[in-house]
Amino acid sequence: MVMGDLQGAAEHWDYITYARKENSDWDNIASSQRNLIIKKLAEDRAKELQYWRGYFPRGTKVTDVNERDDKAIAQLAGGRAEQINLIKIDDKWYVEKIE
């Protein structure tokens, strides 16, 4: 986000868990369709990140990270958000929630 790549930042969100909650038959949808759905969700998230950009000015720093199994919380300082909740899926970390 600092570099202005909102689409790139949006690709680090956990859309799979969200999509499974919204679509009970998610695993039965063809992978090409799932990819299109995730792409659209990421595009929408990039637009939303334009708003969130104000929460993370250039001076925002991660002050602490608490990791437990497949979840982590990154504590922040210097911005309007206090923490980022993360989830690990297939050895990659994704944003679950910003508080």
Image (spheres, helix red, strand yellow):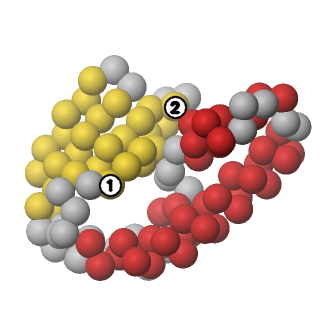
Residue 10 seen anywhere in this rendered image of the structure: yes
Asked if residue 16 shows in the view, the reply is no
Does 4 sit above or below residue 17?
Answer: below
Q: Secondary structure at mark 2?
A: strand
Where is 74 relative to 11, above or below?
above
At label 2, the amino acid type is Ile
The residue nearer to you, when weighing 82 against 63, is: 82
Task: Give the image quarter of residue 70.
Answer: top left
Give amino acid for label 1.
Ile
Which residue is depicted at the point 61% across and 36% down? 21
> Pointer 1 and pointer 2: residues touching (CB < 8 Å)?
no
The local secondary structure at tag 1 comes to strand
Q: Which residue is mark 1?
A: 98
Relative to 29, 61 lies left or right: left
The image position of residue 44, as x and y in percent, is: 61, 68
Name the residue rendered at 36%, 72% in the picture.
52
* Count of numbered tags: 2
The quadrant of the picture occupied by the C terminus is bottom left
Q: Whole-percent x and y of residue 64?
A: 13, 44
Rendered-image quadrant of the N terminus: bottom left
Say which label, 1 or 2, has the lower sequence index: 2
In this rendering, is residue 67 above or below 97?
A: above
Q: CA distance from mark 1 to mark 2?
A: 18 Å
The structure residue drawn at horizontal position 22% and vertical position 62%, both measured from the top left corner, is 81
Which mark's residue is nearer the viewer, 1 or 2?
1
- Residue that carries the numbered disc 2 in the rendered image: 89
Please provide percent x and percent y for residue 50.
Answer: 44, 78
Q: Residue at x 17, y 49 (%)?
A: 75
